[in-house]
């Protein structure tokens, strides 16, 4: 009897796999690609492993994996040597050709070997992460990986497949939406932990640790992002890491918390005051909620990110500066993105589609920039606007 190595692991159906693979292969056929090579990269809280996980179901906790995804033929996952393939075979049932690397035999070489097996020495090969990534338009695939591929397959044609994969992952299936809703449950529970634990005298890192622990106890994955800032006057930015500083009465705490369910990420952004919020922040929050409603109304199929950004920018006046923070949510580093405004023409002109998912959190600032506030939740696009995945009331929280 085969040993059971894992239990109750959330996984997608084979029907979901077939649907994804068909979608990607149709896009590959349009681009005349024979295969896509997805190199390993566990950066940005594992967000850069999104394409590998989307195609194979393999990943989590910075597990390095690469993927060779052919237009026709068996899909191959290339994994790190410290995780036995039997674990991956039990954590997913999409891919059986799993090849752990051994000492001195890297991901690129094993991927090259697989491409040669497929007869693609002269093929048209897409590589993800070369350029145009959502947060790193310069690309996240190393020069060494690309150089090794070009040297080994000099007759092959190499293309950037990053945008192709972003397009494939943009619209979510029913199963993906169910996983995102589960992630939303976890992140909202972590906000409950924040409100229970954040009191004057409690160190910042203790509150942060208990939020993270709660996610893991409920089945969430690490690493996951919790952008944290706390203090008074308002800190100039998020700190990423909490300090050992005890919280003080009067502090403003701003948290962008994410939770991951089988890799799928939901985010909640919440401002909290230890004590009464000054009136100016109540006014900021009121305007921010007006901006949220405008975003939800505008997030319909056919709209563009640039149009929504312009709607929010037009809410600026002599008191407040309003700007759009909104980006895709899914397996990580999801397009499109607007941080105050769209990054480039591709992001500006990106058309919204039904069942795409976003974190929407417009930023409202005083015109001198000294005071700012934002709140946000993960939403799914419907025919008549955005629907929140979360259940918590949108509120400026005061812990008295």
Image (cartoon, rainbow, N blue to C red):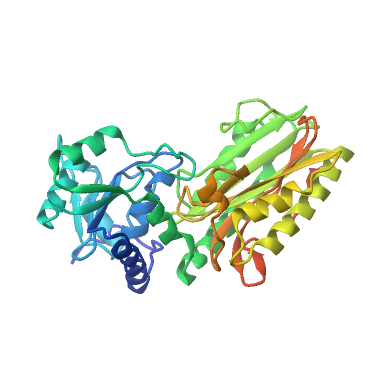
Viewer-closest of 74 and 132:
132
Left/right of residue 400 with respect to residue 353 in the rendered view: right
User: For the C terminus, which image quadrant?
Assistant: top right
Up the image or down, 96 lies above or below 122; here it is below
Viewer-closest of 153 and 203:
153
Residue 393 in view here: no
Question: Residue 336 appears at what percent x and percent y?
Answer: 53, 52
Extreme-right residue of the structure: 279
Viewer-closest of 36 and 75:
36
Left/right of residue 151 with respect to residue 182 in the rendered view: left
Viewer-closest of 183 and 2:
183
Question: Residue 318 appears at what percent x and percent y?
Answer: 86, 39
Quarter of the image for residue 30 reads: bottom left
Up the image or down, 264 lies above or below 102; here it is below
Residue located at (74% from left, 58% from top):
294
Question: Residue 155 appears at what percent x and percent y?
Answer: 14, 46
Question: Residue 158 appears at what percent x and percent y?
Answer: 25, 47
Left/right of residue 162 with respect to residue 117 in the rendered view: right
Left/right of residue 257 with respect to residue 178 in the rendered view: right
Quarter of the image for residue 391 reads: bottom right
User: For the N terminus, which image quadrant?
Assistant: bottom left
């Amino acid at each position: 009897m085969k040993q059971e190595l894992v239990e109750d692991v959330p996984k997608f159906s084979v029907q979901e796999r077939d649907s994804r693979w068909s979608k990607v292969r149709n896009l590959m056929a349009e681009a005349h690609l024979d295969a896509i090579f997805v190199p390993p990269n566990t950066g940005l809280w594992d967000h850069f492993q999104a394409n590998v996980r989307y195609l194979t179901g393999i990943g989590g906790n910075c597990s390095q994996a690469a993927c060779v995804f052919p237009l026709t033929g068996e899909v191959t996952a290339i994994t790190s040597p410290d995780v036995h393939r039997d674990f991956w075979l039990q954590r997913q049932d999409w891919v059986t050709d799993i090849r752990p690397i051994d000492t001195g035999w890297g991901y690129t070489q094993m991927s090259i070997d697989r491409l040669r097996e497929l007869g693609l020495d002269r093929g048209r090969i897409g590589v993800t992460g070369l350029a145009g990534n959502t947060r790193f338009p310069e690309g996240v695939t190393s020069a060494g990986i690309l150089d090794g591929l070009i040297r080994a397959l000099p007759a092959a044609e190499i293309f950037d497949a990053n945008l192709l994969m972003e397009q494939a992952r943009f619209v979510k299936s029913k199963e993906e939406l169910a996983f995102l809703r589960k992630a939303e449950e976890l992140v909202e529970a972590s906000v409950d932990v924040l409100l229970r634990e954040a009191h004057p005298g409690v160190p910042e890192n203790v509150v942060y640790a208990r939020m993270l622990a709660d996610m893991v106890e409920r089945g969430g994955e690490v690493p996951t992002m919790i952008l944290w800032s706390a203090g008074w006057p308002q800190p100039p930015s998020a700190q990423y890491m909490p300090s050992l500083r005890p919280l003080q009465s009067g502090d403003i705490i701003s948290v962008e918390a994410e939770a991951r369910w089988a890799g799928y990420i939901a985010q909640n952004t919440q401002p909290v005051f230890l004590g009464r919020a000054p009136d100016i922040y109540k006014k900021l929050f009121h305007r921010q909620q007006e901006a949220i409603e405008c975003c939800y109304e505008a997030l319909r199929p056919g709209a563009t990110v640039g149009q929504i950004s312009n709607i929010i920018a037009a809410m600026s006046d002599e008191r407040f500066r309003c700007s759009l923070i909104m980006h895709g949510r899914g397996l990580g580093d999801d397009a499109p993105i607007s941080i105050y405004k769209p990054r480039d023409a591709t992001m500006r002109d990106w058309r919204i589609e039904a069942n795409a998912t976003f974190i929407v959190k417009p930023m409202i600032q005083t015109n001198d920039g000294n005071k700012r506030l934002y709140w946000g939740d993960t939403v799914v696009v419907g025919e008549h606007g955005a629907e929140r995945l979360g259940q918590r009331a949108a509120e400026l929280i005061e812990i008295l």
